[in-house]
Amino acid sequence: MGRIEKTVFISYRRTNVPWALAIYQNLTSHGYDVFFDYQSIDSGNFEKVILENIKTRAHFLIILTPSALERCKESGDWLRREIETAMDEKRNIVPLMMESFDFGSPLVKEALTGKLAALNAFNGLRVYSEYFFEAMDKLRDRYMNVEVRETVALLLNAEATKITKTQKTAASDAAPVQEEQLTAQAWFERGYTFENANALDEALRCYTEAIRLDPKFDFAYLSRGSVRKNMGDIDEAIRDYDIAIKLSQRDLYYSFRGNARIDKEDFEGAIADHSKAIQLNPESANAYYFRGDAHFAKGDIDAAIVDYTRAIKFAPEDSDAYVSRGDAFSDRGDIDLAIKDYSTAIRLKPKEAYTYLACGNARREKGDLTRAIKDYSEAISLKTDIADVYIEAYYNRAEAWEREKDYSSAIADYQKYLELDGGERDGDQKEVEEKIKKLQSKLTRMKSTKKKSK
């Protein structure tokens, strides 16, 4: 027989901490024993604190917002692991669907893979900031007032017990969450949705409103900075990142500012920011990867390779790191190593046109024209939205055909290159037109020679 219990675990993305804290404050005021990682818990304690707390608590509340599930497609994502553990332990899972969250959206569907695909089958509760207390009444009276399977009688070790107590004390000492903070969360999520739809003006407006409502909303500054960077306003983006960093010393914030500094060609500043991110999170694959980009842009190829290698160590399934290291190897003249990295990246992510283009370039430099042509053809077949890649693949394949003395195919590719405005883009329109004329002459002579030989 099950029984009604009042032990709760709240699972959430740190962006949405006001929601988690507000729910914690409401439930604890009604006699519930609630745990959530209010303060960051390092990866070394994740297993013994987070997962064991899930196993010992009857109810599992998952805060769902448009931005919350973005990283759940990564197998090692903490939020994903929390949800999977709750499913395995058959906890009473209650999805709390905040404003703008939609199980049917493409972003959510892409994230909910594997076990998480079943998440929308659970009986969820819609929560709006203006009706927060009504939603909490419904949560307590209907969604958690149910018999649940008995929890495992598990004793946490001394360190885990201490960390659990520290987390609960910190959450209990926090100031009450204000309605403006929850409304700011709603505006932030609207901004996130607009940003993903590339409606940058609307995203900027929503993030700005979130900041007006909650001037200490660090992640809103980070996101507004990201939008401004994408709109080309790098200086304003850096100002937003500065404020985010002032509010919260997080590795991610330094990495974002570091990337903006790369755009301004402030490579030393970028390296300093990414180094600070690594200091805060020594296992951050992204920080190593982006510092590698800064070294690469600065021209320090060896340092870039070292950082890309470290990024691969912490995220061995990240195809981008292999591509970037392949580019660095190629620049250094280590063509075999470059091809090896590109091949690994293709295995991990086989639908990236640029990787085939880069691999084709490396094979062409090595003299392996047959396989280079195959790679260029694959890049072309993927019909990438990145025009530069598509155009360059035609030009480079044309050169490879020309070296193979397949003049007919070379002419066709050069003509396609011009048709795609590659000549205007690269400033070689007349040069390519002249190449085509010369190849047509060669082709005519070849045909004439064949006729005479008959």
Image (cartoon, grey):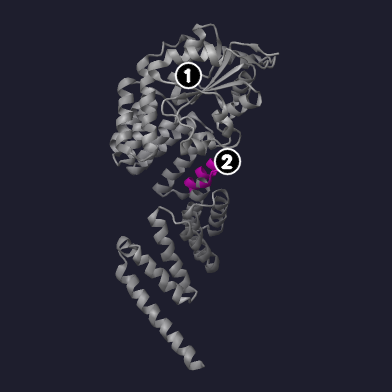
Kind of residue indicated by mark 2: Lys
Residue sitting at 58 percent across and 42 percent down?
316
At label 1, counting other C-alpha atoms closer than 10 Å, the crowd grade (few under 14, some 14-19, many 20 or more) is: many
The magenta-colored residue range is: 302-319
The residue singled out by tag 1 in the image is: 20
Q: Is residue 240 magenta?
A: no
Helix, strand or loop for the magenta stretch, by majority: helix
Q: Is residue 304 magenta?
A: yes
Q: Earlier in the sequence, mark 1 or mark 2?
A: 1
Q: Would residue 403 be found to the left or right of residue 270 on screen? A: right
Residue sitting at 45 percent across and 85 percent down?
446
At label 2, counting other C-alpha atoms closer than 10 Å, the crowd grade (few under 14, some 14-19, many 20 or more) is: some
Q: Nearer the viewer, residue 37 or 55?
A: 55
The residue singled out by tag 2 in the image is: 313
Task: Please provide percent x and percent y for residue 77.
Answer: 55, 32
Asked if residue 18 shows in the view, the reply is yes
Asked if residue 245 shows in the view, the reply is no
Kind of residue indicated by mark 1: Ala
Q: Secondary structure at mark 1?
A: helix
Task: Please provide percent x and percent y for residue 55.
Answer: 64, 20
Task: Please provide percent x and percent y for residue 309.
Answer: 54, 44
